[in-house]
Image (cartoon, rainbow, N blue to C red):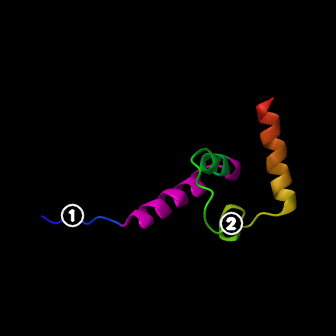
Amino acid sequence: MKINLQSDQKIIEEAFRLLIENLEPAKVAQFWKICNLGNGDYTELKEKLFAGETVDTLYEKIKVQENTID
């Protein structure tokens, strides 16, 4: 029987993709900060996290988030 193992890098990329797809961008950033995962290309990460967003849509999401904290 042969077991097919993925490379560490592929597993890390998949885990990051799942985080980005399932958590709010602020929570992803906080998680990476907690884990000291601040390495890499910020521009690429920013494009993934904020794809399709505008200043106005981000502002509205921030307002909603602030209101749920209270």
Q: Report the residue marked by disc 1.
A: 3
Q: How many numbered marks does the figure carry?
A: 2
Measured as percent of width and height from the top left, residue 67 is found at 82, 35
Question: Do tag 2 and tag 1 residues touch (Cβ < 8 Å)?
Answer: no
- 21 or 8, nearer to the observer: 8
Magenta residues?
7-26
Measured as percent of width and height from the top left, residue 52 is found at 74, 67
- Relative to 61, say whether 70 is above or below: above
Is 64 magenta? The answer is: no
**Circle nearer the N terminus (2, 1):** 1
Name the residue rendered at 77%, 63% in the picture: 53
On the rendered image, what quadrant is the C terminus found in?
top right
Q: In the displayed structure, does residue 6 sit left or right of residue 10?
A: left
Indicate which disc residue 42 carries. Answer: 2
In terms of image quadrants, where is residue 39? bottom right
Measured as percent of width and height from the top left, residue 49 is found at 68, 61
Q: Amino acid at mark 1?
A: Ile
Is 20 magenta? The answer is: yes
Name the residue rendered at 59%, 50% in the picture: 36
